[in-house]
Amino acid sequence: MSEQDQLDRAVSGFIWNIVEIHSQLAEIHKGWAEMMGISEPQWLILMAINDLDEGRGVSGIAVANKLRIYPAFVTNQTKKLEEKGFLSRVISPDDARFLQISLTEKAQAEITNLSNKRQALNLTMFAGLDEASLDYLNKRLASIAKNSRLASQKQSIGVL
């Protein structure tokens, strides 16, 4: 088997592992969402806001960018989450054209209630990996993600 064939086989194995991980994470997110009575995309929006918010709320565009989805979808879903009492949306003090979105106490309490289960799940998923291994893996995955975006752009303009 040639070096190129070996590389192609390794890349293919990697891609299928990512597909499997994505599928399993989607099922896990669906389960968390069901526990809160919301959809999987709404769960991901809550998690993105939780991750991005540093105390002032976050913009819908920041959430859309993190999740790689359309801002209009975020707007639609955050309105629904606000109606359910999980989010507050207030006009940005910096620019009245934008809203700052924050988790409500209700959402924070629900997420906290799930935290023990989430920690147990993380221990299962990442068994055998220490912090240094995860840091190494995250750096490599970030590099692959960046290169994937570049490859996708090249493909969309017909360079590849």
Image (spheres, helix red, strand yellow):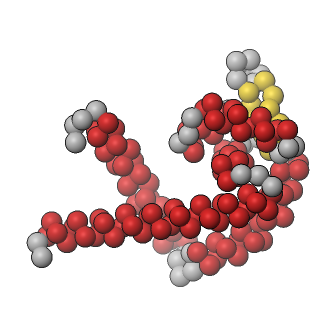
In the picture as drawn, the residue positioned furthest to the top comes out as 96
| Residue 72 location (% of width, % of height) | 63, 30
Q: Which residue is painted at 40% across and 60% down in the image?
A: 140
149 sits left or right of 69 in the view: left
| Residue 56 location (% of width, % of height) | 76, 36
Q: Which residue is painted at 77% across and 34% down in the image?
A: 79
Q: Is residue 150 above or below residue 90?
A: below
Q: Is residue 124 above or below residue 69?
A: below
Marker count (numbered): 0
In the picture as drawn, the residue positioned furthest to the left comes out as 2
Q: Quadrant of residue 119?
A: bottom right
Is residue 72 shown to the viewer in this render? yes
| Residue 48 location (% of width, % of height) | 66, 47
Q: Which residue is painted at 88% across and 50% down in the image?
A: 106
Q: Nearer the viewer, residue 96 or 20?
A: 20
Q: Quadrant of residue 153?
A: top left
| Residue 22 location (% of width, % of height) | 51, 62
User: In which quadrant will I find the N terminus?
Assistant: bottom left
User: In which quadrant will I find the C terminus?
Assistant: top left
Is residue 62 shown to the viewer in this render? no
Q: Which residue is painted at 24% across and 35% down in the image?
A: 158
82 sits left or right of 13 in the view: right
In the picture as drawn, the residue positioned furthest to the bottom comes out as 128
Q: Is residue 151 above or below residue 4?
A: above
